[in-house]
Amino acid sequence: MLTEDPNTAFVNIKYRSGVIVMTAIGTVGISKDPLYKDRVNFTGNTYHKLIAFILRNNTLSDAGIYTAVLTIPNRTIGSQMLIVKASPSKPQIVELEGPAVNGTNYHLNCSALSSSQPPNHNLSMFSEWRRDDMLISSSGRYIVSGTELTITSLSYKQYNGSALSCVAFEDQLVKSVNSDTFIMDVK
């Protein structure tokens, strides 16, 4: 039981700033805050400590920690981080170990910044690479890992003047625009 008198116990769902997004008692949830009123739904039963709320039409400013606080006694009964995904910034192709040299391994990074909120999310970034508009996969001379591309045993004849581009993905669902074209200059 949440309290000795279940008719007086209710749960406040609070946003990280302390704003009460919704108040729930029993199986009824009410939101009075104009920022949330028409966007939040409650399901569950506060008496049984089984509660859920759904926030629709999320914006980046909705991201953060939401906490369920039982009012009698005053204690936190759970919290959840809402991550709002957004496209990463336009990536830049960066040489990791100097210029391209014939016969060596060539290491590149598809560098993009996350736009998802909050900043301390745990989403992973990875990249998709193209050479002369053809998708590159890990095979043969190519090793694709996360945001990096390694071309092994670089060949001047095969790669000089090739056009590389990349796209950054975050959590496999949101992607950036294409990077600018990077023209390989093999020495």
Image (cartoon, rainbow, N blue to C red):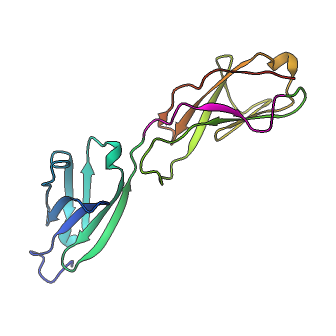
Quadrant for the C terminus in the image: top right
Front residue of 139 and 40: 40
Is 99 contained in the magenta span? yes
Quadrant for the N terminus in the image: bottom left
Q: Is residue 64 depicted above or below 132 in this figure?
A: below
Whether residue 82 sits left or right of residue 31 in the image: it is right
The x, y position of residue 105, in whole percent, is 84, 34
Whether residue 157 sits left or right of residue 92 in the image: it is right
| Residue 59 picture quarter | top left
The extreme left residue here reads: 7
The extreme bottom residue here reads: 4
Q: Is residue 29 depicted above or below 103 in this figure?
A: below
The x, y position of residue 62, in whole percent, is 31, 49
Q: Residue at x 69, y 33 (%)?
A: 94
Q: Residue at x 42, y 42 (%)?
A: 85
Q: Is residue 16 depicted above or below 167 in this figure?
A: below
Q: Residue at x 56, y 42 (%)?
A: 125
Which secondary structure dominates the residues rendered in magenta? loop
| Residue 27 picture quarter | bottom left
| Residue 70 picture quarter | bottom left
Q: Is residue 19 depicted above or below 176 in this figure?
A: below
Front residue of 29 and 17: 17
Is 142 contained in the magenta span? no
Q: Residue at x 30, y 71 (%)?
A: 77
The x, y position of residue 13, in whole percent, is 24, 62
Q: Which residues are magenta?
A: 86-100
Front residue of 89 and 52: 89
Q: How many marks?
A: 0
The x, y position of residue 15, in whole percent, is 28, 59
